[in-house]
């Protein structure tokens, strides 16, 4: 049962450009989390935003949450080749985090 | 600080064989989880343990069993492997319940069942 759905599925940009990924979900949540996964590795937590928060920043990352539209976005500013990875949103409303299928970001130099 | 350690990293099984995937965390986390990741499917929760001594089914528990051996260790067992269990398995841990705090993941076990 997929809760969060990321869009787009794949994104290719040049170094220095900004990358925006979106996540939509269906039911009420307590919080929404974003994770990054480099090829062949486990997921790494990026940001957790709670349902009463609208925006959160961490370094070059900016996450917004619109609970009325049941959507979130992850913005990576001034992208670097090292940002090449898959990005997943995960929604938490009950006992289990439910992950989306991810956005694959490719940043070329 | 190792974080979450999974063994083995790779495994090939024949249909019907059994094996146990091991997971240990050194962060004194209460909760631990097993996920599987398949192409195009994202991560799906197999089992989780909210605290030492408790385990609960996730989204896809059939064909698996788990043991929370102590606070550090959470193992996943395949009693009779099937080709449909070919996947990448990730163990994770969190300080609180998974919807309330970040998950810390291991680097995965890549399992092929022939």
Image: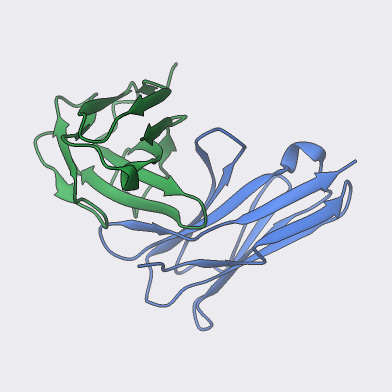
Chain colours: A blue, B green
The answer to whether A20 appears left or right of B65 in the picture is: right
Percent position of residue B47, x then y: 23, 46
Write the residue at 57% across / 57% down: A102
Residue A93 appears anywhere in the view: yes
Q: Nearer the viewer, residue A100 or B29?
A: A100
The answer to whether B14 appears left or right of A80 in the picture is: left
Q: Nearer the viewer, residue B106 or A64?
A: B106
Quarter-wise, where is residue B95 in the image?
Answer: top left
The answer to whether B62 appears left or right of B38 in the picture is: left
Q: Quadrant of the N terminus of chain A?
A: bottom left
Percent position of residue B85, x then y: 32, 43
Q: Residue furthest bottom?
A: A68
Write the residue at 36% across / 53% down: B44
Q: Nearer the viewer, residue A46 or B11?
A: B11
Quarter-wise, where is residue A41 in the image?
Answer: top right
Percent position of residue B35, x then y: 35, 44
């Amino acid at each position: 049962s997929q809760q969060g759905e990321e869009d787009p599925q794949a994104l290719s940009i040049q170094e220095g450009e900004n990358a925006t990924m979106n996540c939509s979900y269906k039911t009420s949540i307590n919080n929404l989390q974003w994770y990054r996964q480099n090829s062949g590795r486990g997921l790494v937590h990026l940001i957790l935003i709670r349902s009463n928060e609208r925006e959160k920043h961490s370094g070059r990352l900016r996450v917004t949450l619109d609970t009325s539209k049941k959507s979130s976005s992850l913005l990576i500013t001034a992208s670097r080749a090292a940002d090449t990875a898959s990005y997943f949103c995960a929604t938490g409303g009950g006992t289990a985090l439910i992950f989306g299928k991810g956005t694959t970001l490719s940043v070329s130099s | 600080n190792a974080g979450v350690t999974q063994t083995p990293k790779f495994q090939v099984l024949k249909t019907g064989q059994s094996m146990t995937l091991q997971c240990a965390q050194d962060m004194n986390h209460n909760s631990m989880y097993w996920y599987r990741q398949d192409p195009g499917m994202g991560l799906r929760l197999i089992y989780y343990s909210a605290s030492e001594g408790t385990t609960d089914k996730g989204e896809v528990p059939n064909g698996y069993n788990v043991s929370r051996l102590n606070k550090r260790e959470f193992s996943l067992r395949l009693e009779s492997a099937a080709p449909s269990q070919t996947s990448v398995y990730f163990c994770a841990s969190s300080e609180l319940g998974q919807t309330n705090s970040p998950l810390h993941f291991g680097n995965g076990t890549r399992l092929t069942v022939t």
